[in-house]
Image (spheres, helix red, strand yellow):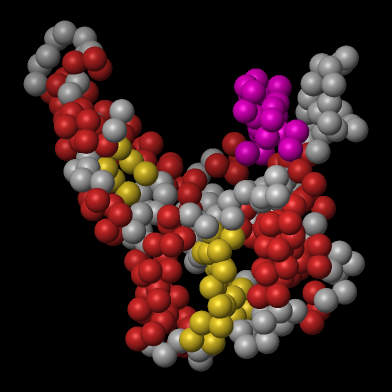
Amino acid sequence: MNNDFLSFFLFVQLTYGSFAQDEFQATKLSSLYCMVPKEENQYTGIIKLLLHFGWMWIGVFTFDKNKGEHFLQKMHPLFSQNGICLAFTQKIPQQAPFEDLSELFDLISIISNKMVDQKANVFLVYGESFTVLWLRSIVFLRDYENKEIASFRKVWILMFPIDFILTGFHRAWDVQLFHGSLSFTVHSREIRGFKEFLQDITPSTHKDGFLQEVWEQLFDCSLSNEGLPSMCNQTCSGEEKLENLPTPLFEFQMTGQSYSIYNAVYAVAHSLHEAVSSRAQHGSIKMFEFSKLQPWQVMSLCHTYLLFQ
């Protein structure tokens, strides 16, 4: 179902990811609501931050996707207009080219050399969580005993939606390299009852496959039945606590993306509630049927709700 089709029927669509302004306009969706600030706000913030500290010579790492290319196209003129010089720009692939070891080793060598570039004291990173894992992996391969970490005097600036997520064999890795990083993120707020909800979560209280998989990854244990093969050496007790996990493994606070999803769900819920209440106030005796509610009606109410939040 493409965008034009959805736009024709005016289905409400909400996104918790960021869109560049021209990318958003290109969708031609009057029914699409972004639950996070415009990405251009980050561009302005980056320039102001660099100018404030006088960081005029930087290196840029970005993921090798359309959004990464779009980011470079938007930032290059801003860097030039403000006298900020680029020591290098390096794209990070989304997946390592394991099928071609020669290409993989060449890529690791190139990125590794960029990371010890003497001209740039500031690294700007635009991408996703795997981008940080890529960079940390390369440092690990270059310096597996962490002897060079203390002398790695670089300032890291991480842009939304990058987050530190360590899973699988990465969980034991030292992320000291990124300590003191400056990070751009979106607004969040503590939701009443959210921490208590996380504290009470156990595989026995929420019996679904998603939680089981996440639980096994977070605690490096297995919830599988006896006799079934498992990649883990230990069995989960089911009494593990999410609050005891280190932050790189599990963020116990309400993140910006989670808060955006929370607002999106509540926007639709309040709109549906308003639609039901409106029909009830008009003396409709017949039981309300959601199947007869038109998408444009929810869209209009959703717009009103978001406008006054």
Residue 93 image point, x, y percent: 59, 55
Nearest the viewer among 283 and 156 is 156
Query: Residue reaching furthest top?
Result: 286
Q: Is residue 205 located in the magenta-colored stretch of the structure?
A: yes
Main SS, magenta region, reads helix
Q: Is residue 60 above or below residue 265?
A: below
Kindly identify the residue that appears in the image at 68 percent across and 35 percent down.
214
Kindly identify the residue that appears in the image at 63 percent across and 78 percent down.
155
Kindly identify the residue that appears in the image at 24 percent across and 51 percent down.
26
| Side of 101 where 294 appears, left or right | left
Q: Is residue 113 above or below residue 278?
A: below
Q: How many numbered marks does the figure carry?
A: 0
Residue 35 visible? The answer is yes
Q: Quadrant of residue 88?
A: bottom right
Nearest the viewer among 309 and 122 is 122
The quadrant of the image that shows the N terminus is: top left
Kindly identify the residue that appears in the image at 40 percent across and 76 percent down.
76
Q: Is residue 50 located in the magenta-colored stretch of the structure?
A: no
Nearest the viewer among 294 and 174 is 174
| Side of 94 where 278 appears, left or right | left
Residue 190 image point, x, y percent: 50, 51
Q: Is residue 291 above or below residue 13?
A: above
Which residues lie in the magenta part?
Answer: 198-217
Residue 72 image point, x, y percent: 43, 69
Residue 118 image point, x, y percent: 68, 87
Nearest the viewer among 146 and 254 is 146
| Side of 5 where 246 appears, left or right | right
Q: Is residue 126 above or below residue 165?
A: below
Q: Quadrant of residue 183?
A: bottom right
Residue 244 visible? The answer is no
